[in-house]
């Protein structure tokens, strides 16, 4: 579902269930309130930026005496990945 489709579903559910979402040629909503909320929605999505850990970071490599070259520690990486998401204010479902 695109961001616009998510917005329209939220707007219909929470704000105005019978909104028709008519748009002008530029793709802007004709309703002033709806257009303003669409711009706020877009700004909130653009403001969200998360610095994810690098998969090539050596701290995610595990070395074992019986395995040549070692292996990638997926659990440690996912733990740091989830921590970065939570630090950005996102809820993460288990």
Image (tube, rainbow, N blue to C red):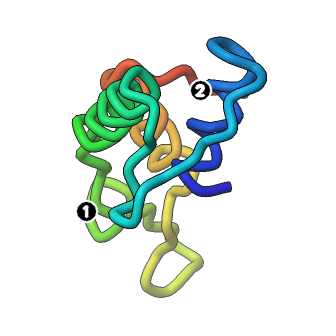
Disc 2 to disc 1, C-alpha distance: 23 Å
The N terminus, quarter of image? bottom right
Residue 82 shows in this picture: yes
- In the rendered image, which quarter is residue 27 located in? bottom left
- Percent across and percent down for residue 49 are 25, 42
Q: Nearer the viewer, mark 2 or mark 1?
A: 2
Q: x%, y% of residue 88? A: 32, 26
Q: Is residue 94 left or right of residue 62?
A: right
Residue furthest bottom as drawn: 68
- The residue beneath circle 2 is 92
Q: Nearer the viewer, residue 34 or 72?
A: 34
Look at mark 1 in the image and give the residue it sits on. 57
What residue sits 59% from the left and 26% below the top? 92
Compare residues 22 and 12 and report the one nearer the observer. Answer: 22
Horizontal placement of 68 versus 57: left or right?
right
Compare marks 2 and 1 and give the one earlier in the sequence.
1
Quadrant of the rendering where the C terminus is positioned: top right
Quarter of the rendering containing residue 24: bottom left
- Residue at 40% x, 20% y is 33
């Amino acid at each position: 579902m695109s961001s616009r489709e998510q917005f329209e579903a939220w707007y219909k559910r929470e704000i105005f269930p019978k909104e028709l979402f008519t748009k002008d040629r530029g793709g802007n909503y004709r309703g002033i309130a709806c257009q303003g909320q669409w711009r706020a929605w877009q700004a909130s999505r653009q403001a969200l930026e998360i610095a994810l850990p690098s998969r090539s970071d050596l701290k995610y490599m595990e070395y074992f005496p019986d395995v040549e070259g070692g292996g990638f520690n997926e659990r440690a990486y996912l733990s740091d990945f989830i921590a970065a998401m939570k630090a950005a204010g996102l809820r993460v479902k288990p």
